[in-house]
Amino acid sequence: MLEIRDLSVGILQTNTYVVFDRDSGEGIIVDPGDEAERIIDLVKRCGVRVRGIYLTHAHFDHLLAVRDLRSDLGCGFYLHRGDELILKLAQKYAREFIGRIIPPPPDPDGWIEDGQIIRIGESSCKIIHIPGHTPGSVCYLLEEERVVLTGDTLFAGSIGRADLPGGDLRQLRSSILDKLLKLPDDYAIYPGHGPSSTIGVERRMNPFVRSFVDSGRLP
């Protein structure tokens, strides 16, 4: 079984997740948004051997700690190729949105793909491509634990923005309807910001999701 620990980091309170196998101690970090020292402290307290840093998408607030973690932990950094351009714009948007000058993020050590399985000790998680918030947005599906890390695509009570560069409302709607809402209601969602929820609660109570379900797809 996998264990999931989280931290809210940075000025935008991004949820960073450390996902690890209890028996082997092997794990991954998802969306290290900032405050590398706090993330490293969590990793050490949990006794995790980090085998990779993975992003749900390449907006700057999900990757500000990547450079330091990659150096300190000696592990690779991975995202979907669809967000290659978004990654290159991280410095620009950090300056425009929060007035912060940051070094360029490192080049990825590899690209992840839809349907890819990441082994974590004796367990695994599955990558699902969910474009819309960004072209390369993905979620991380932990089937045994009945958990999905949804990034900035689906939140408790809300959905991700589609009005930023690379966003596409039609794709966002399709990703939510055709991929996330296909999961059983008891699956927990761990989003990129804010509290956790479940697929069932969001299906019934999220006003944006309800409007998608009631109106169907965009023509």
Image: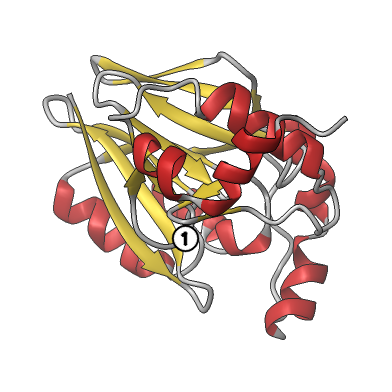
Which residue lies at the image location 63% right of the left edge and 45% below the top edge? 211
Q: Which residue is situated farthest in the front direction here?
A: 214
Q: Closer to the camera, 129 or 205?
A: 205
* Residue 19, image x, y percentages: 31, 38
Q: Closer to the camera, 108 or 7?
A: 7
Which residue lies at the image location 51% right of the left edge and 61% below the top edge? 33
- Tell me if mark 1 has few (under 14), some (14-19) or many (20+) residues whose alpha carbon lies within 10 angstroms of its own: many
For residue 183, above or below residue 99: above
Q: Which residue is situated farthest in the bottom direction here?
A: 99
For residue 99, above or below residue 190: below
Q: Closer to the camera, 122 or 104?
A: 122
Q: Which residue is situated farthest in the left direction here?
A: 23
Which residue lies at the image location 42% right of the left edge and 69% below the top edge? 9
Q: Is residue 20 visible?
A: yes
Q: Closer to the camera, 62 or 43?
A: 62
Residue that badge 1 annotates: 193
